[in-house]
Image (cartoon, rainbow, N blue to C red):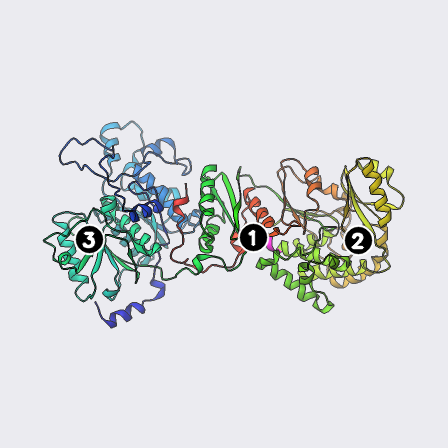
Amino acid sequence: MDGEETYRSWNDIDSGEEIVISGIAGRFPNSDNMNELKENLFNKIDLVRADHKRWEIEHAEFPRRMGTVNNVEKFDADFFELPFDQAHTLAPEARMLLEHSYEAIMDAGVNPKQLRGKNTAVITGSSYNETQKHLLFRDIKINQNIYGCHKSAVANMISYCLDLKGPSYNIDAACSSSLYALAFGYRCIMSGKCEDAMIGATNLCLYSIINLHFSRLDYIEAHGTGTKAGDPQEINAIYNSLCKNRETPLMIGSVKSNVGHSEPASGFNQIAKVIIGFETGFVPPNINYTSPRKDIDALLNGSIRVIQEQMPLKNGYVGINCYGFGGSNAHMLLKWNPKQKINNGAPNKDLPRLVILSGRTEESVKLFLNDIANHPIDVEYIRLLHDIYADNIKGHPWRGYIILNSFQQDSIKEIRNYEGVNRPVWFIFSALGSHWPGMGRNLLKFHVFAKAIRKCDDILKPYGISVIDIMTKMEESIYENRLKMFLGIIAIQIGLVDLLTSLGITPDYMISHSAGELGCAYADKCLTIEQTILSAYFIGLACADEKIIHSSMAIVNINYEHLKNICPANIEIICYNNENSSVVCGLKESIEEFMKKLQVNNIYVKKINCNIPFHSSYVASAENQLLLSLNKIIPCPKKRSSKWISTSIPRTKWFTSTSNQLSSADYHTQSILNKVLFSQTTELIPSNAVVIEIAPDDVLHYILTSSLPLNVTNLVLTRQTDKNINTILQGIGKLYNCGLQPQVANLYPPVVFPVSRGTPMISPSIR
């Protein structure tokens, strides 16, 4: 069907009919996965051996050399929830197919949970089953489950264990069984009987009718059994069908020269070899071929040649022959994915990549993370991993993460056992003293965070304020302005809330420290982004009034009752962190003098970098101005949800009036004027909580660590460091290790599917 007209018809094929083999996994003779097979094929390793020890050579007609797969006796029955007797009567080939089916789904970048209950077909190719004969005629026991040893049950077992609801059956066409299974899978999809298909260990669709200019065919992966009768017939058929109008020799080969003849599964071995060729750009060479047979003219005259060295692919078209008994022959045409890697998959920006994953054992997670670390960053490969581990995988008690940085050799990684318990998430919004120069520069690399900050910037432009400048400038002097200092902190909290929300991380409860109540209001959806940043602007503006005296604050770690007794009259206790930690406020000179006295007595004290006298008598004069401004911004206050626990109202008054339950102008005014009752809320945090501090710096980390139960996970997302971006990625990774499911893909620019040719395979790393 050569000719220009045919070539045009190929181009006119509906793009909706084109297919992609998206996932593949398998175990091959002396090759435990696709990567090992690739290395062995390219290195011309003969995988068929005489020292296989599978059986004793007792008869002249027994094959002396054969290809054997490893670890046929091993199977993770607990993971697939199969009882002891069923696992031990399940045929070894069925056990292997089940494990590799699972790996193939993940190799496609799909979490197996997504396929559960879906109309997915499972069609296998199998010809005989020695386990069935062994159990039926030798070792059968009363009440023993023998269903799993029958070849017809191979597909059914995969459907059952993976909860797939589509057609499920086995096909026996002898040596062409696997490609016939592919053909039946294609028919099921095209007829609407299923949405997709698992064929053996492969999830794919097929296009059955192809018109191709045969000069574009790079290579034929032949059946090539090496038999006296079969090889001349096959090569003559190839020559008559494909070589008549070719100007160049047609290259052929057969993976059987490397791995032997796996009979009903041989077609999958051929597909594996071709996919290796597509992904690397080179077809692996044949071995054990020295000279052409004298009775095969096409080999003698050079019309067809056997490749003996790796051959580059040019057009990306490969044919596969697979022959059975009695004329049940199959042929498949595969086309490579035309999408090529750009810049080897490296990211366009220097944003480090966070990868999360889980596994059956600590060792399996460690090896997978090491595999990832030992290769250059490939954003498409990483996106597939993000999709796989976006949801919990049942039976994976170990979790880990790694942070990949193009400019950093030592990757940050951590592995932890996950007990499978859902833990409550608490957001802690701090405010006082958490600002620092350039605190938002790195965070702006995350597009969700940057979008929120640009929105804040647009809202404040009419007031002559640039939030972006506040967050990115490195001058210390910018925070001498009380208004800018406060705006920068609240803007960071808005951006972090949006970022966490995009990851699917939302709080079960939230509390604040000082003016962080605005952060609670935004996270609780009581205030819009516009209301939140404008409230921060007018609070900061009122507190920046020249009439309000500049003051200083300090943390004092001493028993509260003792502190009350020794505190000078001109110094106020404004925050109750816990029974042994409080915040004091007063004139700069008074605070410095008091700090010296405490330090002489070996009492820990630390100055807070904040000149706004929140919660003290110094700011009381701003009350009227605050109420006037905030009432305009919040004309219709919303009720605070049960998630938001107040630190500005005594616990005894939380439910005494409706006004105390509203996120109103009055509430936020009083949150600035009242003392901070932090300890009354932290006492409610349970021992299994995950606590996340939402602020530019970890100013509350020590207080929380010393106040909360030991089993609480106390996390920070940002810290005053030039590697602040690693801090937030570590925090997200730790959230995953604690059992949360952050949608990490949302941190990064989108990836267009399908991924490019040459994207590393995932299945070899799954253990």
- Quadrant in which the C terminus appears: top left
Q: Is mark 2 on a helix, strand or loop?
A: loop
- Asked if residue 499 is among those painted magenta in the image, a careful observer would answer yes
- The residue wearing badge 2 is 611
Drawn side of residue 525 relative to residue 29, left or right: right
| Picture coordinates of residue 729, whole percent (x, y) | 57, 49
At x 23%, y 65%, the residue is 215
Residue 361 appears anywhere in the view: no
Drawn side of residue 503 relative to residue 42, left or right: right
> Residue most toward the left?
295
Q: Is residue 62 above or below residue 654?
A: above
User: Of callouts 1 and 2, which one flags the residue occurring earlier in the amino acid sequence?
Assistant: 1
User: CA separation, marks 3 and 2?
Assistant: 84 Å
User: CA separation, marks 3 and 1?
Assistant: 51 Å
- Asked if residue 346 is among those painted magenta in the image, a careful observer would answer no
- Quadrant in which the N terminus appears: bottom left
Extent of the magenta region? 498-502
- The residue wearing badge 3 is 329
- The residue wearing badge 1 is 503
